[in-house]
Amino acid sequence: MELEKHTSNTNRSLIRGIEILRCFKPGVGMLGNSEIAERTGLPPSTISRLTQTLVITGFLEHDRQHSAYRLAPTVLSLGHAFKTGSTEIKIAEPLMRKASEKLRLNVGLAVADRLDMVYLESIRYTKNIALRTVASGQRVPMERTSLGRAWIARLEPKAQAILLAKLKRQGIKNWIKIEKEIHLAIESISKNGYCVASWLPEISAISTSVQLLNGRHASLNLSTPAESRMHNVLETYAPALFELKEKIESELKKQLPPNKEYF
C-alpha cells in the first residue's frame, strides 16, 4: 500500500506504525514482518523496528512459534473507548434500536475510512444469532453498498471525482457496472434523498445521509434481514428512514451550545 503524502509537521514513524496496524483486518489473525512489508510497501528493516516498538507499547503481540504478530487487547480497548465516549452513538443507538424493532429491519450508521465504510453502530433485527455478524467497527465496501454510495453522494463534485478515481485504480471487478450504479445513486440522493443497493444475496438496503456534530456526516441505512424477502419493497420504507434521520439530527442539535449553527 502506498502511504499517504505527509507534511513536515507530521511524524513519519507514527504514520508508518499506524499503517502496520491497518494491515490487520477481519480474517487476518497473524502477519509476519515480510507479509507486513509487502502490504505496506515499507522496507523490511523498517517493519522489524516498528513491530518491535508496537509490541513494547502494547499494540501488537509477538507469537514466537509462528514468528508473526497479532493485534493486542489494547486495540480493542481503544474501540470501546471511542464507542462509549461518542455522543453521536449514545444518541443514535436507542433511536436505531426502536426503529429496528418497529420496522423489523436492520439499522446501521457508518462513516468512511479511506475506501471502506466502517459501522459506528449496527442493530441487527434477525432472530438468527448466526446471522448477526455485522457489528460496530466492521468494514464494508464503499463502492457496493448503499451506505458507501450515500456517502459518496454527500461529497462535493470535485471530491467525488477524486474518490471515484481512487476506486477505479483498485481494479475492482465489474467496475464499469458499479460506477454506473454509483452515479445513479448520486442522482437518487439528489432527487429523492436516498439510494438503494444490494450487494449480498437476499440483502438490500436503503440509505441516506445524517448530519453529525462539528460538521461531519454519516450514512444511515435500513436493510433487510438475511432471511427476509422484503428487499423488493424496501424502497417504501423511505419515509421511515427520513423520520429516523430527523430524530437523530434533532437530538444531536440539542447538544450544541446556544446560537451555534448545526449545519
Image (cartoon, rainbow, N blue to C red):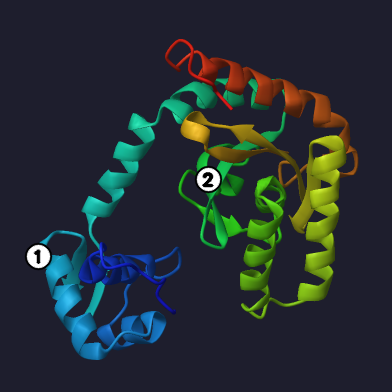
Query: Which quarter of the image is occupied by the C terminus?
Result: top right
211 or 38: which is nearer to us? 211
Considering every residue shown, the one lying at the far top of the view is 258
Residue 79 picture location, percent across and down: 34, 45
Residue 131's disc number: none
Tell me, for residue 56, which label it has, or none: 1
Q: Nearer the viewer, residue 123 or 180?
A: 180
Q: Position of residue 57 (x, y in %)?
A: 12, 60
The correct choice, above or below, for 193 with respect to 100 in the image is below
Element under disc 1:
helix
| The N terminus, quarter of image | bottom left
Query: Is residue 63 visible in this depiction of the protein?
Result: no
**Nearer to the camera, 63 or 256:** 256
Give the image location of residue 246, x and y in percent.
67, 21
Q: Which mark is residue 119?
A: 2
Q: Earlier in the sequence, mark 1 or mark 2?
A: 1
Q: What's the distance in space between the residues labelled 1 and 2, CA to CA?
A: 30 Å
Q: Residue at x 42, y 26 (%)?
A: 87
- In the rendered structure, the answer to whether residue 167 lies left or right of residue 34 reads right
